[in-house]
Structure formats: C-alpha cells, structure tokens
Image (cartoon, helix red, strand yellow):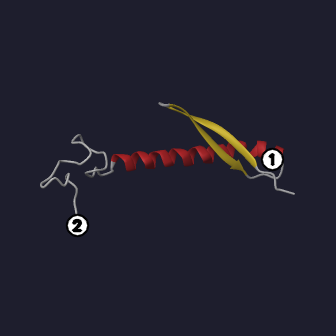
C-alpha cells in the first residue's frame, strides 16, 4: 500500500494577482493534516516570499550584455567594427 500524502494550497495576493502556493503537510491522518495546515502554510508562504525577494534582487542587479536582448541597439548590441555586431569574439 502507498503512503498517504497530504497537500495544502494557499494563495498570496500580489500586485499582479493571486499567486498559488502548494505544499506538503507531514501528517499520519487527515485530522493531523488539518491541524498542521496553518504551520505548513506559514512556512510555505515565508519560503515563497523569500524566493520572490531573491528573484527581485537578482533581476535588479543583473548585467546587461550585448546580444542578450538588453539595451535599445538591436539584437547585435552597438554594431561594432567590421560587421561583427558588437559581439566579443575570442580567437
């Protein structure tokens, strides 16, 4: 027989709308899962908020490199000399 897995769901309201959060609840019975829902939900929401903050920090500090869609000079960066499209080439 398989072990029973209890899964909880919650939503975080963001400026972009609701963000679903799904998490496992460690429990031996449905009653224990219901009792453990609040604690498991709190941990899952905290973990999700931390991940969102990390993603925001990474996005804010990311470097814009030529040829990776950054800037307004088109897909090749600044153009460069000799028609290489501004890409750095290593011999």
Q: Is residue 11 above or below residue 42?
A: above
- State the residue at coordinates (61%, 41%): 21
Q: Residues within 10 Å of mark 1 (few under 14, many from 20)?
A: few
- Disc with the residue nearer the chain's start (1 vs 2): 1
**Residue at the farthest right position:** 1
Q: Position of residue 52 (x, y in %)?
A: 48, 45
Q: Residues within 10 Å of mark 2 (few under 14, many from 20)?
A: few
Q: 69 or 76: which is nearer to us? A: 76
Q: Position of residue 31 (x, y in %)?
A: 83, 44
Q: Toward the viewer: 72 or 9? A: 72
Q: Residue at x 34, y 46 (%)?
A: 60
| Residue situated furthest front in the rendering | 83
Badge 1 element: helix
Instruction: Tell us which disc is closer to us: 1 or 2.
Output: 2
Residue 63 located left or right of residue 79: right
Q: Which mark is residue 53?
A: none
Q: State the residue at coordinates (77%, 43%).
A: 35
Q: For residue 73, what is the image quadrant?
A: top left
Left or right of residue 72: residue 39: right
Query: On the picture, is 77 further left or further right than 22?
Result: left
* Residue 26 percent across, percent down from the top left: 74, 52
Camera-nearest residue between 9 and 50: 9
Which secondary structure lies at badge 2? loop
Q: Residue at x 44, y 48 (%)?
A: 55
Q: Which residue is mark 2?
A: 90
Q: Which residue is mark 1?
A: 32
Of the 4 image quadrants, the one containing the C terminus is: bottom left
The answer to whether 66 appears left or right of 82 in the picture is right
Quarter holding the N terminus is: bottom right
Count of marks overlaid on the render: 2
Residue found farthest to the left: 81
Task: Report the Cα–Cα distance between label 1 and label 2.
Answer: 61 Å
């Amino acid at each position: 027989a398989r072990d029973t897995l209890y899964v909880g769901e919650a939503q975080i309201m963001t400026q972009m709308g609701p963000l679903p959060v799904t998490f496992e609840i460690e429990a031996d019975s449905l009653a224990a899962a219901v009792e453990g829902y609040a604690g498991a939900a709190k941990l899952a929401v905290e973990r999700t908020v931390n991940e969102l903050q990390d993603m925001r920090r990474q996005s804010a500090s990311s470097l814009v490199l030529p040829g990776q869609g950054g800037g307004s000079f088109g897909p090749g960066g600044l153009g460069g000399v000799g028609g290489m499209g501004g890409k750095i080439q290593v011999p």
